[in-house]
Amino acid sequence: MRLVLTSDTHLPKRARDLPAPLWAAIDDADIVVHAGDWVDVATLDALSARAARLIGCHGNNDGAALRARLPEVAFADLDGLRMAVVHETGPAQGREERCAARFPEVDLLVFGHSHIPWDTTAANGLRLLNPGSPTDRRRQPFATYMTATVAAGRLTEVTLHELPGR
């Protein structure tokens, strides 16, 4: 099962559209995961139309129309891998412990908000992934997204993709 992980797309404020490499990855994915801050309902509609399966949540910059269609936390079982998707997880310090306590029944937590890529594992085995942002790199050298593979209930081949500058 091929996953694409993205967050903080902020369309059309930070870019007019998603970068072409991300759209190509979305077209090839079995599941697209978006961890909030869509900003524009049209982005949700476009991803819904192109993704084989879309799992997402709303973020702090998402208005009432997006909040009506997306949960604060999305949960999914991916071939036995228990995943949650949430936008905000608080400060980096203590993140693993906080998230492990908040999501004790989850194997993978995908989150966003900071625009900073993150890949760590909590003491209880919870994997935390933040794909960064494909449109607003903030203080990072590149805009980013992630891909991963799920096989037999295990997450494998997590890759951070750097996008070319606009």
Image: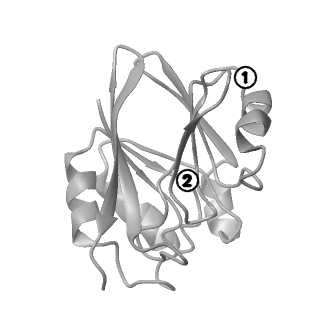
What's the residue at 48%, 84% (across, down)? 14
Percent x, y for residue 147?
33, 45
What's the residue at 67%, 43% (across, down)? 73
Badge 1 amino acid: Pro
User: For the residue labelled by badge 1, is the local secondary structure a helix, a strand or a loop?
Assistant: loop
Q: Quadrant of residue 144?
A: bottom left
In this figure, which residue is indicated by the disc labeled 2? Answer: 35
Foreground pick, 29 / 162: 162
In this figure, which residue is indicated by the disc labeled 1? Answer: 104
Tell me, what colour scheme is on the image? one colour
Quadrant the N terminus occupies:
top left
User: For the residue labelled by badge 2, is the local secondary structure a helix, a strand or a loop?
Assistant: loop
Q: Is residue 41 left or right of residue 20?
A: right
What's the residue at 77%, 54% (across, down)? 90
Q: Is residue 4 left or right of residue 29?
A: right
Counting other residues with Cα less than 10 Å from the Cα at mark 2, is it few (<14), some (14-19), or many (20 or more)? many
| Vertical arrangement, residue 1 with respect to residue 58, above or below | above
Label 1–label 2 contact, CB within 8 A: no
Percent x, y for residue 45?
42, 63
Quadrant the C terminus occupies:
bottom left
Q: CA distance from mark 1 to mark 2?
A: 19 Å
What's the residue at 28%, 62% (across, down)? 22
Q: Is residue 13 left or right of residue 61?
A: left
Counting other residues with Cα less than 10 Å from the Cα at mark 1, is it few (<14), some (14-19), or many (20 or more)? few
Percent x, y for residue 153?
41, 16
Badge 2 amino acid: Ala
